[in-house]
Amino acid sequence: MAIFKPDDMTAVVVALPAKGIDINEVQLAAIRKDKLIAVEGILTTTDTKLLVESCDIKGAKWVPILVAKTATWVDEKNKNKYPTENHVTVRGVIRKVELKIGAESFDWGIENANGSIPFIPKEGKTLDLGMKLVSGSLRMVDGRPVVKADKIEPVGK
């Protein structure tokens, strides 16, 4: 397990499979600021007390958890394959939702793992429901991930 903290109010726990990903490399990436690592997997949330407390964010009741399938150091040769720093691309089914997290309400979600990850589309953007890739910056609302979508595209493009 590694914990990434882009700032004092945000943390993402990365859970690693038993085989296939070098835990030392991912833990190193969590503390280094001069190198980037791209992690692919299932993004969800957890309220597991030990994981929430290990993130050291005051008042947090939930934290995002990324169950990793792959982890790759980002360099000049492969950087165009991955989202930019602190951004995500989520693959799932876009749904119209009524989701309230803390004081905020969300109208759109993308099904991924065990629920919907809320996202905020660009203003005036017409959305088609169904399987899509939603890309954008990641922020936390009461410990849950929310994507501010920069790009929404059909799967396979």
Image (cartoon, rainbow, N blue to C red):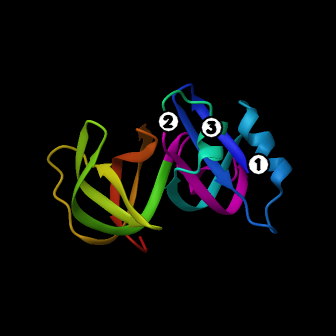
Per the image, label 2 sits on a secondary structure element best described as loop
Nearest to the eye among marks 2 and 1: give it: 2
For label 3, the residue is 53
For the point 85% across and 48% down, which residue is it? 24
Q: Position of residue 127 (x, y in %)?
A: 20, 61
Q: Position of residue 135 (x, y in %)?
A: 41, 53
Per the image, label 3 sits on a secondary structure element best described as helix
Nearest to the eye among marks 1 and 3: give it: 3
Tag 1: Cα neighbours inside 10 Å, few (<14), some, or many (≥20)? many
Q: Amino acid at mark 1?
A: Val
Can residue 74 be seen at all in this image of the molecule? no
Per the image, label 1 sits on a secondary structure element best described as helix
Q: Position of residue 146 (x, y in %)?
A: 38, 46
Q: CA distance from mark 1 to mark 3?
A: 20 Å
Range of residues picked out in magenta: 60-87
For label 2, the residue is 60
Q: CA distance from mark 2 to mark 1?
A: 24 Å
Tag 2: Cα neighbours inside 10 Å, few (<14), some, or many (≥20)? some
Q: Nearer the viewer, residue 145 or 124?
A: 145
Note whether 155 is above or below 107 in the view shown.
below
Q: Amino acid at mark 2?
A: Ala
123 left or right, relative to 22: left
Q: Nearer the viewer, residue 12 or 87?
A: 12
Tag 3: Cα neighbours inside 10 Å, few (<14), some, or many (≥20)? some
Note whether 128 is above or below 53 in the view shown.
below
Q: Residue furthest front?
A: 49
Q: CA distance from mark 3 to mark 2?
A: 8 Å
Question: First in sequence: mark 3 or mark 2?
Answer: 3
For label 1, the residue is 26
